[in-house]
Image (cartoon, rainbow, N blue to C red):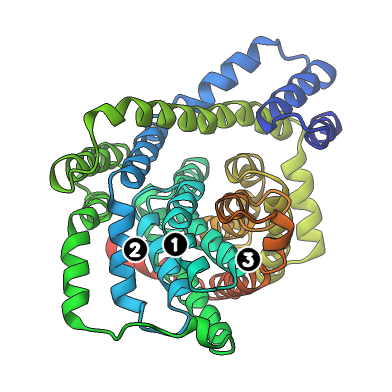
């Protein structure tokens, strides 16, 4: 256990990519502490990605990239502007609503952040918004992709926890909307103190909202197909991903006509690259998880926690603190694959529902996307805004506070994450 954990942390601190740190640490630990043949590494790598469900990831990634390139993102911004653009702090609110809409298509926080930043940041600069806070809010909006279906993080959690992907997707809907509402409320309160720059420019009209909805309606087909198909038992998550990709392709090619066939090779190559990054992390993390399990660490941790407290609320508070810290330093998929196999059996021993626990994990790690030093969504938003990460980090307190409040509600009120799955999936 010491060889695996210590080697991994040492390699991570030294700047080695996380996929290599996981693999090398596990390999050294196997050689030094077990009698297992080295061929176990190849077996675990293959076993880690030998899953039909994991095939959903490249299709969802490609769907998100097509959305970004084919005009769906811009139309979501226009619809969000018609919906909330008349409220004080309108551009902050538009970014949040747009992030929620895009999250229902792509499942990738960094891709959504890049798409929102490209459209919103120039207008925010022109209207003299606080650009550091704008970047922090856009990063938080992009991080909603970790919670709202079809979240790639939720797919990995469902596979790791051996839970229904449909139930996990539905479990993230209400918490995702809760985070969206909290972010909007926080930005509205802040903007009321911000002077003329944050005041609305156009009055709300039903005609404008109707025009924005009709323009964005074809793009809205994608989340409707995904959620409706999975919860209705029409197809599996992997089949839903294929249908989502096909629907996005048809919408961008033949309805919006902003995507050209000549654009597809570059988009597909990028989708392959991003998907391979996720899958190779899953593969190497499966070796690392196996070596930790064989060393008895889950049983040791279970013994310590049950001796420390028999209160499930205290246990969840400890888990939240652990995941918030881990999310600051580690990519979400890696954190899930390393920690969830250890923490989930403990959660079951406290009679905590696996779906609620999975949503709590996803929400913690979505907060990690906006907290330095990892904070990949924060880096993307800061880069597009032309600001240093140190400058943007000073304003991350507002979205962090809103997301943390939502996390506490999901932790203490199980019905927030369990009501929708119980209603729609019995």
| Secondary structure of the residue carrying numbered label 2 | helix
Q: CA distance from mark 2 to mark 3?
A: 20 Å
Residue ID at (37%, 82%): 201
Q: Which mark is residue 3?
A: none
Residue ID at (69%, 33%): 18
| Residue 398, image x, y percentages | 63, 74
Which mark sits nearer the N-terminus, 1 or 3?
Answer: 1
- Asked whether residue 355 is in view, the answer is no
| Secondary structure of the residue carrying numbered label 1 | helix
- Asked whether residue 117 is in view, the answer is yes
- In the picture of the structure, the residue carrying the numbered disc 2 is 77
Q: Which mark is residue 120?
A: 1
Marks 1/2 in contact by CB < 8 Å: the verdict is yes
Which mark sits nearer the N-terminus, 1 or 2?
Answer: 2
Q: CA distance from mark 1 to mark 3?
A: 13 Å
Which mark lies nearer to you, 1 or 2? 1
Q: Which mark is residue 132?
A: 3
Question: Image quadrant of residue 9?
Answer: top right
Q: Is 361 drawn above or below residue 40 in the view shown?
A: below
Q: Position of 8 compared to 271: left or right?
A: right
Residue ID at (54%, 62%): 140
Q: CA distance from mark 1 to mark 2?
A: 8 Å
């Amino acid at each position: 256990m010491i060889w695996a954990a210590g080697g991994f942390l040492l390699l991570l601190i030294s700047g080695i990519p996380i996929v290599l740190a996981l693999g090398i640490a596990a390999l050294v630990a196997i050689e030094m502490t077990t009698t297992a043949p080295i061929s176990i590494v190849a077996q675990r790598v293959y076993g880690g990605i030998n899953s039909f469900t994991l095939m959903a990831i490249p299709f969802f990634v490609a769907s998100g990239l097509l959305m970004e390139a084919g005009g769906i993102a811009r139309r979501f911004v226009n619809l969000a502007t018609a919906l909330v653009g008349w409220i004080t702090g309108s551009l902050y609110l538009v970014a949040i609503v747009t992030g929620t809409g895009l999250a229902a298509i792509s499942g990738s926080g960094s891709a959504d952040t890049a798409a929102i930043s490209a459209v919103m940041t120039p207008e925010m600069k022109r209207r003299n918004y606080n650009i550091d806070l704008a970047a922090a809010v856009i990063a938080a909006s992009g991080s909603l992709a970790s919670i709202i279906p079809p979240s790639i993080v939720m797919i990995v959690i469902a596979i790791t926890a051996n839970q229904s992907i449909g139930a996990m997707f539905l479990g993230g809907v209400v918490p995702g909307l809760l985070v969206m509402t909290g972010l909007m409320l926080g930005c509205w309160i802040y903007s009321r103190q911000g002077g003329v720059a944050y005041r609305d420019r156009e009055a709300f009209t039903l005609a404008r909202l109707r025009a924005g909805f009709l323009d964005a309606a074809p793009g809205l087909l994608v989340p409707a197909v995904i959620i409706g198909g999975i919860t209705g038992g029409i197809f599996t998550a992997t089949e839903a991903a294929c249908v989502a990709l096909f629907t996005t392709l048809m919408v961008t090619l033949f309805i919006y006509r902003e995507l050209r066939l000549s654009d597809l090779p570059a988009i597909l190559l990028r989708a392959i690259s991003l998907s391979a990054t996720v899958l190779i992390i899953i593969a190497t993390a499966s070796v690392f998880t196996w070596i930790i399990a064989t060393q008895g660490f889950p049983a040791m941790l279970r013994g310590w926690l049950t001796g420390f407290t028999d209160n499930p609320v205290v246990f969840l508070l400890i888990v939240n603190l652990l995941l918030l810290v881990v999310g600051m330093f580690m990519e979400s998929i890696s954190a899930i694959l390393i920690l969830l196999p250890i923490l989930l059996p403990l959660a079951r021993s406290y009679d905590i529902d696996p779906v609620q626990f999975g949503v709590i994990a996803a929400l913690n790690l979505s907060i990690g996307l906006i907290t330095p030093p990892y904070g990949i969504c924060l880096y993307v938003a800061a880069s597009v805004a032309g600001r240093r990460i140190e400058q943007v980090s000073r304003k991350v307190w507002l979205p962090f506070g809103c997301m943390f409040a939502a996390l506490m509600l999901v932790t203490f009120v199980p019905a927030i994450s369990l009501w929708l799955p119980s209603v729609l999936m019995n």
